[in-house]
Amino acid sequence: MKHMGNMMKQAQQLQARMLKMQEELAGRTVEATAGGGMIRVAANGRQQITSVRIEKEVVNPEDTEMLQDLILAAVNEALAKSQEMVSSEMGKLTGGLKIPGLS
């Protein structure tokens, strides 16, 4: 029983560290670009888009489809970078142990 108590204590400590890490990651951002830097998108560790910046030179009213594609590409890259950042940091915390809902 003592061994089981130690395991529960360790699990609670890990959970507390993971919650703290999630809070820290929420404050971190990553940035992605498209169109040679004409579109910039930032995302935080909660996989939320925090900013979108579009240079006026890329805005062509005759070709909105290209602008849409560039924005979509930058958003998807920013979200992928954010997920990678979270997975990497959580992996360090858990020693590579795969925990459902965290990777």
Image: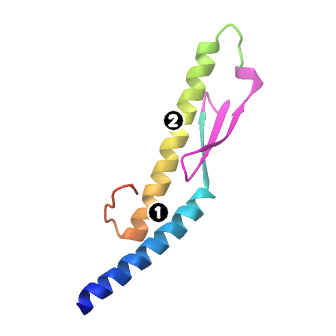
Q: In which quarter of the view is residue 71 placed?
A: top right
In space, the residues marked 1 and 2 are separated at their CA atoms by 20 Å
Occupied quadrant, residue 8 = bottom left
What residue sits right under mark 1 in the picture? 89
Magenta-drawn segment: 34-58
Residue at x 33% of width, y 65% of height: 96
| Residue in view at x 52 percent, y 42 percent | 79
Is 44 located above or below residue 1 in the figure?
Answer: above
Residue sticking out furthest to the left: 1
Give the mark, 1 or 2, whose residue is nearer the N terminus: 2
Classify mark 1: helix, strand or loop: helix
The reply, left or right, for residue 62 in relation to residue 19 is right
Q: Secondary structure at mark 2?
A: helix
Q: Could you tell me the amino acid type at mark 2?
A: Asn
Label 1 is placed on what type of residue? Glu
Checking the image for residue 76, the label placed there is 2
Location of residue 91 with respect to 68 vertically, above or below: below
- Residue pictured at 47% horizontal, 68% vertical: 18
Q: Quadrant of the N terminus?
A: bottom left
Does the stretch in magenta take in 50?
yes
**Residue 88 image offset from top left, x and y in percent:** 44, 59
Nearer to us in this view, 88 or 19: 19
What scheme was used to colour the molecule?
rainbow
Nearer the observer, 32 or 11: 11
Q: Nearer the viewer, residue 15 or 37?
A: 15
Viewer-proximal residue among 78 and 27: 27
Q: Quadrant of residue 49?
A: top right
Residue drawn at 63 percent across, 38 percent down? 41
- Tell me if residue 42 is in the magenta stretch: yes
Structural crowding at the residue carrying mark 1, measured as other residues with C-alpha within 10 Å and reported as few (<14), some (14–19) or many (≥20):
some
Quarter of the image where the C terminus is located: bottom left
Give the class, few, some or many, for how many residues have Cα within 10 Å of label 2's Cα (few <14, many ≥20). some
